[in-house]
Image (tube, helix red, strand yellow):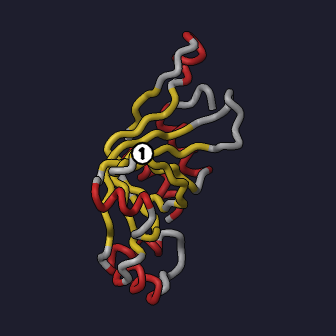
Amino acid sequence: MPNASAHDRACEVLRRNKYLVLATDDEHGPWAAALAFTLVPPRAFCFVSQTASRHGSAIAGHRRIAGVIFDSTASAEEVESIQFAGSARVVKDVDRIAMVLGLGGGKPDKAEVERIAHDPSVAMYELTVEEAHVLDQAAWIERGVDAREPVDFDAVAEVVSGEHG
């Protein structure tokens, strides 16, 4: 999609990919983890993970995060990505967990919702996107510069989530 807008390219990245790479930092240093995500408009990703995981522990101590979503099978000439930064929090509210689990279609399993809400070893994490960028294809094609251009993540999430619900 070399001639498509940054907005359209960001939408396509979200449509085609199911995993994000989350970067966190703690007293042991930086860490990255690949995680399956659910897009939650207007500006969040959610995932369920163990609270004792390195990224779970890092989020508990330091809420700032960064991440990227991309197709690792794409060639260097075709790759698109969304890079983002923001904050993370643990979600233990039963209604919010049920809503997120229900975004994929169907009714969320009540036992799974209760387990996520009340089991201290597992949590739903919500990543709030505060800034997002896609590759600046014009800068690369015209000047050979590896650059990024900002995208309105709220608008991107609204379009993509509207296609699924």
- Camera-side residue of 133 and 88: 88
> Dividing the image into 4 quarters, which one contains the N terminus?
top right
- Camera-side residue of 30 and 49: 30
Residue 48 percent coordinates (x, y): 46, 69
**Residue positioned 49% across, 65% down in the render:** 165
Q: How many marks?
A: 1
- Camera-side residue of 33 and 48: 33
Residue 2 percent coordinates (x, y): 62, 27
SS type, badge 1: strand
Residue 135 percent coordinates (x, y): 52, 29
Neighbor class of circle 1 (other Cα within 10 Å; few <14, some 14-19, many 20+) is few
Q: Which residue is mark 1?
A: 30
Q: Is residue 97 above or below residue 74?
A: below
Q: Is residue 2 left or right of residue 91?
A: right
Amino acid on which the number 1 mark rests in the picture: Pro
**Residue positioned 43% across, 35% down in the render:** 133
**Residue positioned 45% across, 89% down in the render:** 111
